[in-house]
Image: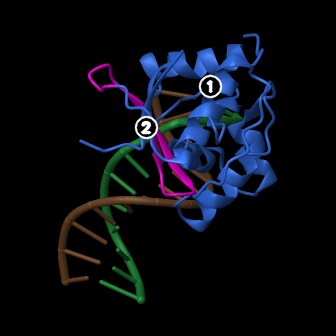
Chain colours: A blue, B green, C brown
Amino acid sequence: METYAAVVKSPVGLLGVKNTEDKLTGIDFLSVNHKPLPPKVAFTKEVVSQLEHYFADPTFRFNLPIMLQGTPFQRVVWKQLRKIPSGVTAEYGKLAEKIKTSARAIGNACRRNPIPIIVPCHRVLARVGLGGFAGETEGELLAIKHWLLTHEGYDS
DNA sequence: ACCAACCCATCCT
DNA sequence: AGGATGGGTTGGT
């Protein structure tokens, strides 16, 4: 089982926070058999604090140093994702046009986003329907995507 | 290093 | 329903 810098309770369930001394590297959605784990070092405290701010106020803008590990293509896509503000949505197909690739390839890159919520892949929707989230196309995780969107004011 | 086959959070006809 | 799509992974040589 993976070890986390912190495991925090949130309105969408337990979140596992992964980071180095000064860079955020990942966020996982955890099942209930994980125990909450309070942050120890200062940087982890800051990450948890900003997450709590966001859940209290959907317009809160994250300001955290982030380390994304991925292929050059994935980095380009993730960079685009971070430009989408809270309350705004994008489409796989539209993003694909913008960077001259296919909608499917965009979906592939989103699927591998290691830092959901903060790198806001939940703001990318399919032409018709929600699209997927955290690797799933149906089920509990998709409910989280929907929760995040309505939290940000999106009306389906 | 290359290549074939397969997998996908899509989209069009 | 079927096919085009393009990035990634895997497993072979």
Label disc, if present, on residue A66 of the rendered structure: none
Residue annotated with mark 1: A52
Q: Which callout, 1 or 2, points at the residue further toward the start of the chain?
A: 2
Q: Give the class, few, some or many, for how many residues have Cα within 10 Å of label 2's Cα (few <14, many ≥20).
A: many
Q: Is A26 inside the magenta-drawn segment? A: yes
Q: Subunit of mark 1?
A: A
Q: Is A56 inside the magenta-drawn segment? A: no
Q: Is residue C12 left or right of residue A5?
A: left
At which x and y percent is residue A27? 49, 40
Front one among A124 and A70: A70
A138 w.r.t. A45: above or below? above
Q: Subunit of mark 2?
A: A
Between the residue at mark 1 and the residue at mark 2, the CA separation in whole angstroms equals: 13 Å
The answer as to whether the residues below labels 1 and 2 share one chain is: yes
At which x and y percent is residue A83? 79, 45
At which x and y percent is residue A2? 29, 44
Residue annotated with mark 2: A6
Q: Is residue A110 left or right of residue A33?
A: right
